[in-house]
Image (cartoon, grey):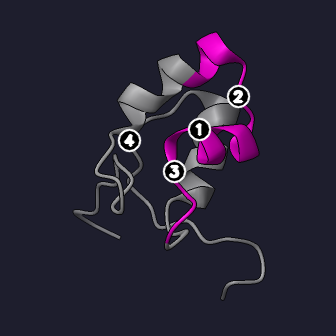
């Protein structure tokens, strides 16, 4: 999708670039990140981005990602 850029949790307004270093220092997996920051715990739209962020280190996404089974 041209022009899309996803770089933050919409519910909390927290940039993924702020979350990644914290997650790495604390050793957080996705459930821990959600518990500690609230990101991904409300509407859940950022969960697939958070999951990929933790796996790859990406903090800006230019494609729409979906939770498994959400389509």
Residue 29 relative to residue 41: left or right: right
Percent across and percent down for residue 63 are 44, 61
Tell me which corner region of the image, top left, top right, bottom left or bottom right, holds residue 1. bottom left
Ranked by sequence position, the earlier of labels 3 and 2 is: 2
Would you name the residue on which mark 3 appears?
38
> Mark 1 and 2 residues: CB-CB less than 8 Å, in contact?
yes
Q: Quadrant of the C terminus?
A: bottom right
- Calculate the distance from the C-alpha at mark 1 to the C-alpha at mark 2: 9 Å
- Calculate the distance from the C-alpha at mark 4 to the C-alpha at mark 3: 19 Å
Q: Is residue 14 above or below residue 68?
A: above
State the SS at label 4. loop
Q: Nearer the viewer, residue 63 or 52?
A: 52
The residue stretch that appears in magenta = 23-42
> Mark 3 and 1 residues: CB-CB less than 8 Å, in contact?
no
In the picture, the disc for residue 60 is: 4
Give the residue at x 55% y 68%: 44
In the picture, the disc for residue 36 is: 1
- Calculate the distance from the C-alpha at mark 2 to the C-alpha at mark 4: 19 Å
């Amino acid at each position: 999708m041209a022009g899309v850029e996803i770089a933050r949790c919409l519910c909390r307004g927290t940039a993924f670039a702020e979350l990644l270093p914290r997650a790495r220092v604390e050793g957080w997996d996705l459930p821990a990140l959600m518990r500690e920051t609230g990101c991904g715990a409300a509407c859940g739209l950022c969960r697939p981005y958070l999951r990929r962020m933790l796996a790859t280190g990406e903090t800006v996404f230019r494609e729409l990602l979906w939770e498994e089974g959400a389509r």
